[in-house]
Image: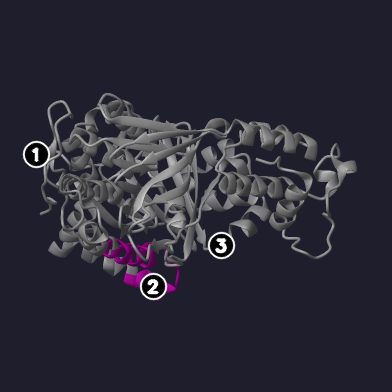
């Protein structure tokens, strides 16, 4: 193909820099500017990154991020892009299912399918599973699914912390104490399990089975469709050096998160709603003997801060602040943030002062809810956060992802066996899981209003009354079980598993109780 040239670069840079057709500080590039740094030409690093993303998406290539950082001039950048375009080649793979996204939903589903004799190509954009500040609290329902899948103990053995329950404190007064140890053993505690430990164990198990092909460091660039019906028939992905791989499959499952590229390529709206009034800023501190064995929400004035023990011997802290106000908080500086956190967590003030030293120690989670307008099409399924996004309250993220995988697994096995991966056939997945996802969102909204919302003395009084009611009545016990396990409860259909993961898949139905 023709080289990517200065005119192409100018058009994209101006679009990404917000210049459009108007006049501005950043202008057209000409031959005399080839060796002038981008910054001196009026283009900042954000414009370069946005331009690179557009080029990668439009041409189906991948460009090394470190090389982008080193390309300071238009000449260096053009050389980098054209090398990636020239190196682009195409491989073709044939499989049964393409799973996009190696998070909990994608990896758990992949392992279930492989153990049922289904061939899977798993596509993951990140080259590694190291994911800091992703959800790591595992509810009993999720633990049971992993145990039925045979990976819980091994994942836990990589490092995890058991937590006895959930508490809400108003300054020093205990408002709510939900003790998970009252649930039936063995799944009667919360588990703080680093997501990388879970993902590494799931991926290790997948690699042991036939029919598995892992494309790490690859991103999906387009969906394939049949000429006859327009059904999804696979995907094109781009990897290191821009090399493309065409993966032909009967089903594509998008498990690539709340900003799902698969969903975007399918033209399915995310259904995002601003359902919560708070965002969360996460950070970690050395535990230094301050562990409590519980997940705690500390309320002090207008601040609400979540704290729980995590591996290895650390405290994970989530500071809630009004939605979309992080920029103002950051502008006040790290000293002001430290003082506010120390007021909310006086027992940790010394650790906060010593270890929270710069804004880069903090990670912002933009909290929102979403429900995709469609979860299934002919040959296409969205699962996990790609289909329904929740907030962090109640530690439901991994639970929901694993439940999606367990419900989808037998439906896909049956569809593949029947040779019918139509929307009509796959619609059973959305019918089974959408009510549960909606119920979780309703519960999270109630939790947010009750324990993270603000108000005067009346609100505090009502909060205390509600907490006592939940703690002391049978209804409270039912609510705890529903949060812990979901409703209906979901199990892995292990009767579809072969001893060697190599037998033909057998038709079956979803197992729920």
Q: Name the side, left or right, on which 127 lies relative to 425.
A: right
Image coordinates for residue 14, horizontal then vertical, percent: 75, 56
Of residue 120 and residue 48, the one placed in the foreground of this image is: 120
Q: Quadrant of the C terminus?
A: bottom left
Snapshot quadrant of residue 206: top left
Image coordinates for residue 482, horizontal then vertical, percent: 20, 57
Of residue 331 and residue 74, the one placed in the foreground of this image is: 74
Q: Nearer the viewer, mark 2 or mark 1?
A: 1
Q: Is residue 25 above or below residue 139?
A: below
Instruction: Please tell me how crowded label 2 is: few (under 14), some (14-19), or many (20+) other residues with Cα within 10 Å.
Output: some
Dot label at residue 495: 1
Of residue 238 and residue 294, the one placed in the foreground of this image is: 238
Dot label at residue 382: none
Residue position marked by numbered label 3 in the rendering: 324
Residue farthest along the top direction in this orientation? 208
Residue position marked by numbered label 2 in the rendering: 459
Disc 3/disc 2 C-alpha distance (Å): 24 Å
Q: Name the side, left or right, on which 202 lies relative to 128.
A: left
Reply yes or no: does residue 344 show up in magenta: no
Disc 1/disc 3 C-alpha distance (Å): 47 Å
């Amino acid at each position: 193909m023709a080289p990517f040239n200065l005119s192409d670069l100018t058009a994209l840079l101006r679009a990404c820099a917000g210049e459009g057709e108007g006049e501005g500080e950043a202008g057209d590039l000409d031959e005399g500017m080839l060796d002038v740094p981008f910054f001196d030409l009026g283009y900042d690093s954000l414009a370069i990154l946005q331009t690179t993303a557009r080029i990668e998406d439009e041409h189906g290539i991948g460009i090394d991020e470190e090389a982008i950082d080193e390309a300071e001039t238009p000449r260096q950048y053009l050389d980098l892009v054209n090398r990636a375009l020239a190196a682009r080649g195409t491989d073709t793979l044939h499989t049964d299912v393409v799973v996009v996204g190696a998070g909990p939903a994608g990896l758990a589903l992949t392992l279930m399918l492989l153990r049922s004799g289904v061939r899977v190509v798993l596509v993951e954009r990140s080259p590694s599973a190291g994911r800091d500040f992703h959800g790591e609290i595992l509810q009993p329902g999720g633990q049971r699914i992993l145990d039925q899948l045979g990976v819980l103990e091994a994942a836990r053995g990589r490092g995890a912390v058991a937590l006895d329950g959930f508490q809400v404190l108003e300054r020093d007064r205990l408002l709510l104490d939900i003790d998970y140890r009252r649930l039936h053993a063995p799944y009667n505690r919360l588990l703080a399990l680093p997501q990388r430990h879970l993902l590494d164990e799931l991926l290790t198990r997948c690699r042991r089975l036939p029919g598995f092909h892992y494309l790490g460091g690859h991103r999906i660039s387009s969906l394939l469709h049949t000429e006859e019906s327009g059904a999804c028939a696979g995907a094109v992905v781009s990897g290191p050096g821009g090399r493309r791989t065409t993966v032909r499959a009967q089903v594509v499952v998008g498990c690539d998160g709340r900003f799902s590229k698969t969903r975007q390529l399918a033209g399915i709206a995310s259904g995002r709603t601003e359902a919560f009034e708070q965002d969360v800023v996460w950070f970690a501190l050395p535990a230094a003997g301050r562990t409590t064995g519980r997940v705690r929400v500390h309320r002090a004035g207008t601040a609400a801060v979540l704290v729980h023990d995590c591996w290895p011997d650390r405290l994970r802290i989530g500071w809630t602040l009004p939605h979309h106000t992080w920029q103002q908080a950051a502008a006040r500086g790290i000293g002001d943030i430290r003082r506010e956190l120390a007021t909310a967590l006086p027992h940790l003030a010394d650790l906060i002062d010593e270890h929270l030293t710069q804004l880069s120690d903090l990670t912002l989670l933009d909290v929102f809810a979403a429900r995709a307008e469609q979860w299934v099409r002919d040959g296409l399924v969205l699962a996990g956060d790609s289909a329904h996004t929740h907030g962090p309250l109640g530690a439901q993220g991994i639970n929901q992802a694993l439940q999606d995988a367990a419900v989808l697994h037998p439906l896909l096995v049956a569809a593949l066996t029947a040779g019918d991966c139509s929307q009509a056939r796959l619609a059973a997945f959305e019918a089974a899981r959408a009510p549960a996802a909606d119920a979780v969102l309703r519960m999270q909204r109630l939790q947010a209003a009750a324990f993270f919302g603000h108000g005067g003395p009346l609100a505090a009084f009502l909060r205390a009354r509600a907490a006592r009611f939940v703690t002391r009545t049978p209804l409270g016990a039912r609510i705890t079980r529903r949060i812990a396990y979901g409703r209906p409860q979901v199990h892995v259909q292990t009767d579809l598993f072969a001893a060697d993961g190599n037998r033909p898949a057998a038709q079956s139905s979803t197992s729920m109780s």
